[in-house]
Each structure stands twice: as structure tokens, then as C-alpha cells.
Image (cartoon, rainbow, N blue to C red):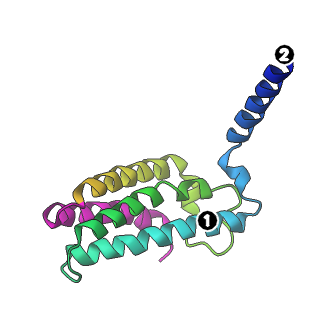
Amino acid sequence: MTGRIATRLAGALAASVLLAVPAMAQFKKAEDAIQYRQSAFTVMANHMGRLAAMAKGEAPFDAAAAQSSARIVDTMAKLPWEGFVPGSDKGKTGAKPALFQNPDDVKKLSQRLNEETAKLVSAAGSLETLRPQVGATGSACKACHDKYREK
């Protein structure tokens, strides 16, 4: 019995250590971090584009599709931030150097974005609620782009 308990404790300890590894460790190279965050932003932009087309009347409103896209936007909006690791300010990136020099401001802007994307999920059920929330979410995206993204 003692052997089983020790084995279970060792397994639990190993699992907890693996789960505690910081997100930075998942990127072997700065290029991997850049690609990770750019991929998340690309997926998010694609689905925001679908929502914006519905909101502007350029595409027919489809509540199920809108809700699916809104959930994807909300999920994607949480992902890119761990890809801004030391050394990832060089290479093929559209980020201005100021982004890496102002982590507190970037964190505030990312929190605003996440608040708006959460509201987007709730608003996606009807065109009347979707329209203004697409604008608010887009404004949250733009706030960061205006400050920290190369034109």
C-alpha cells in the first residue's frame, strides 16, 4: 500500500510541476512566439470580419454563425498575450518597440479587449445587440493597434 501511495504522490508532483511551467517555456525560439500570437490574431480578425459583415448588412445575419464566431473571437483574444516574450520584439513582427516597453498599458488594453469580446458573445444572438458590440469590440482592438502596431 505504501508503494502505491508513493507512486501516486510522485505522479501528482510530476503533473503539478509540468502544469506550473511558464507559458514562455513553450516557445523554443522567438519566431515561434511571434507566429503563435500572429496566428491567434489572424483567426480573431477573420471571425471579427464575419461579424462586422453581418453588422453592416454586407452578409445575412445568422445567429448561430454569429454566436460561433463571437465565441472564437473571445477565445482567441485571450491567447496572443503569452506570445509577447522577451526576444520576440525582433523579426517579422508588426509590433512597435513601445509595446514591449509598456507592459502595464498593454495589459490594461488586453483586459479591455477581453471585456468587450465577452460582451460580444452575449450580444451575438441578435443583430440589434450585435451591431453596437461589434463596434465596441473593434474599438478595443483599434486602441492597441493605434499605439502598438506598425502601420
In-image side of 124 versus 42 (left or right): left
Examine the image and state in which quarter residue 93 appears.
bottom right
Q: Main secondary structure of the magenta part?
A: helix
Residue at image point 46% right, 50% down: 105
Q: Is residue 136 magenta?
A: yes
Say which element carries label 1: helix
Say which element carries label 2: helix
In-image side of 67 versus 26 (left or right): left
Q: Whole-Å distance between the Cαs marked 2 and 1?
A: 44 Å
Q: Position of residue 129 (x, y in %)?
A: 17, 60
Q: Nearer the viewer, residue 113 or 10?
A: 10
Determine whether 1 is above or below 8 in the image.
above
Residue furthest to the top in view is 2
Residue furthest to the right in view is 3
Residue at image point 52% right, 56% down: 79
Which residues are the magenta region?
124-151
Q: Which residue has dot 2 on it? A: 2
Residue at image point 77% right, 27% down: 8
Q: Nearer the viewer, residue 23 or 99?
A: 23
Q: Which residue has dot 1 on it? A: 36
Q: Position of residue 22 (x, y in %)?
A: 68, 44
Which marked residue is nearer to the observer: mark 2 or mark 1? 2
Decide if residue 96 is in sight here. Answer: no
Residue type for callout 1: Tyr
Disc sitting over residue 65 in the figure: none
In-image side of 66 versus 77 (left or right): left
Examine the image and state in which quarter residue 124 appears.
bottom left
Q: Position of residue 108 (x, y in %)?
A: 43, 47
Residue type for callout 2: Thr
